[in-house]
Image: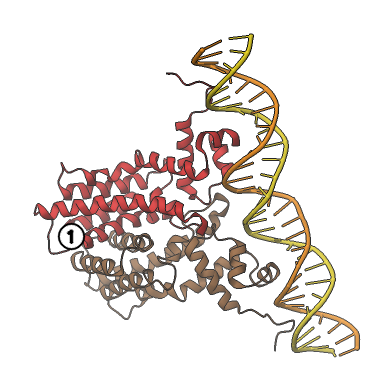
Chain colours: A brown, B red, C orange, D yellow
DNA sequence: TTCTTTATGGATCGATTAGTATGTAAGTAA
DNA sequence: TTACTTACATACTAATCGATCCATAAAGAA
């Protein structure tokens, strides 16, 4: 059954993409409604009819990020490939994506709401939860590798996970600082080669 | 010669400390003047007479951070100690400081202005420049180690620097996420042991 | 047509933003 | 004392914040 009412004139999916770029570049707090509306080319009424609130739009943006740029770490949950391969792939794809100049650099889940005003702590929690899922995938990937004998059991999975995760998150700041993809990719080669992962 | 005029009733140094905590916790953009004034216990007039502007206060806060909590990486510039020792010390001190619950977690230079509204890009540049100095110290420390034969020359100093720096910056996000000092410290043990640094 | 539903343009809301203006208090210097 | 300097308390500014209201437009359903 077709929906009734006046049809929306703007492309909602495109609007979410525009919003994602702004939130990614400037963070949640620092991105204003005026900027969002201008990027989308819509009025306040249309904005609130379509998205409900600035925070709700951010949630939709997180979903969009997870199903697009954020997929670079999805391989960590792929049990059909070897753990070491998955980890290296996740790191290299992360470095490639985060330094790509066709969009804001770094990871949106790391940069967009890590710090915020106290009244928006629940927004910070949104990206915190997303990072938790990535960490969980990484740790389970490492555990699988240890069970397969692929990765040494001498080091606890939790510790290896912390090591890789710290390196991965740090790439976001480096990408913002203009560190080249080449340098980061070579660092990945080094960390993979020597850390037995 | 003693200064003339009515003496200031509040402690400026203490006020800067209070401001540092707020900027560190919430970031530059998300910290309001109302919050700063309340934490300092002063009026608008006193604030602007003492600090000039919100941005100028941030500069003073950066200086304060560099000469207090930020000193954890100063050992990288200490040419009297071995490079490997300096790097390990910098990492361990960083992890300890950033996970200490007596102040906001993570590194203020990484968290407080990595993302911001476009009109405040010059504020972002302030912390970017501070990070650049840390990177410079790290890279020169690595180069010294390679010249001493302490660190392998098989890997370019720039690449090793990127590896360590990424790991170090990533600790900020992990500290915010509640990853324990113990886990991070063990990861440092691992990265030091296996990466030949 | 008439009714219902949804989207739109545009004005507007109260609250908050960073920053100022003004008059006065409190010190030193002459 | 008088002059000067600095800091204070208070009130205030223009601009911006996220969000809402209302009349109207544009669609399907009856």
Judging from the image, mark 1 belongs to the subunit labelled B
Residue A54 to residue B100: above or below: below
Q: Nearer the viewer, residue D23 or A148?
A: D23
Q: Residue at x 52, y 69 (%)?
A: A20
Label 1 environment density (alpha carbons within 10 Å; few <14, some 14–19, many ≥20): few
| Residue B175 visible (yes or no) | no
Q: Nearer the viewer, residue B82 or B117?
A: B117
Quadrant location of the C terminus of chain A in the rendered image: bottom left
Q: Tell me if C10 is positioned left or right of A81 in this view.
A: right
Q: Residue at x 27, y 70 (%)?
A: A182
Q: Secondary structure at mark 1?
A: helix
Q: Residue at x 48, y 54 (%)?
A: A115
Q: Residue at x 67, y 68 (%)?
A: A48
Residue A105 to residue B129: above or below: below
Q: Tell me if A47 is positioned left or right of C28 in this view.
A: right
Residue B29's spot in the image, x, y percent?
52, 51
Residue A35's spot in the image, x, y percent?
58, 64
Please tell me how many numbered marks the rendered image carries: 1
Residue A154's spot in the image, x, y percent?
20, 61
Residue B17's spot in the image, x, y percent?
45, 37
Residue C3 to residue B46: above or below: below
Q: Nearer the viewer, residue B191 or C8?
A: C8
Residue under circle 1?
Answer: B194
Quadrant location of the N terminus of chain A in the rendered image: bottom right
Q: Tell me if B103 is positioned left or right of A64 in this view.
A: left
On the image, which quarter does residue A56 sit in?
bottom right
Residue at the outermost left position: B149
| Residue B124 visible (yes or no) | yes
């Amino acid at each position: 059954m077709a929906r009734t009412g006046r049809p929306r004139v703007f492309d909602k999916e495109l609007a979410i993409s525009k919003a994602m770029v702004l939130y990614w570049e400037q963070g949640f707090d620092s991105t204003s409604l005026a900027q969002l509306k201008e990027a989308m080319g819509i009025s306040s009424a249309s904005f609130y009819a379509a998205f409900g609130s600035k925070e709700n739009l951010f949630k939709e943006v997180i979903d969009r990020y997870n199903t697009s740029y954020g997929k670079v770490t999805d391989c960590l949950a792929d049990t059909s490939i070897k753990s070491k391969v998955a980890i290296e792939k996740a790191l290299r794809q992360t470095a490639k994506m985060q330094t790509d100049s066709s969009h804001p650099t770094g990871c949106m889940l790391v940069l967009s709401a890590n710090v915020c005003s106290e009244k928006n702590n629940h927004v910070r929690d949104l990206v915190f939860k997303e990072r938790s899922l990535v960490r969980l995938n990484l740790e389970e990937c490492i555990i699988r590798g240890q069970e397969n004998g692929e990765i040494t059991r001498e080091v606890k999975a939790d510790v290896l996970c912390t090591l890789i995760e710290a390196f991965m998150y740090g790439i976001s700041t480096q990408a913002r600082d203009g560190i080249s993809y080449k340098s980061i990719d070579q660092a990945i080669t080094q960390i993979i080669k020597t850390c037995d992962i």
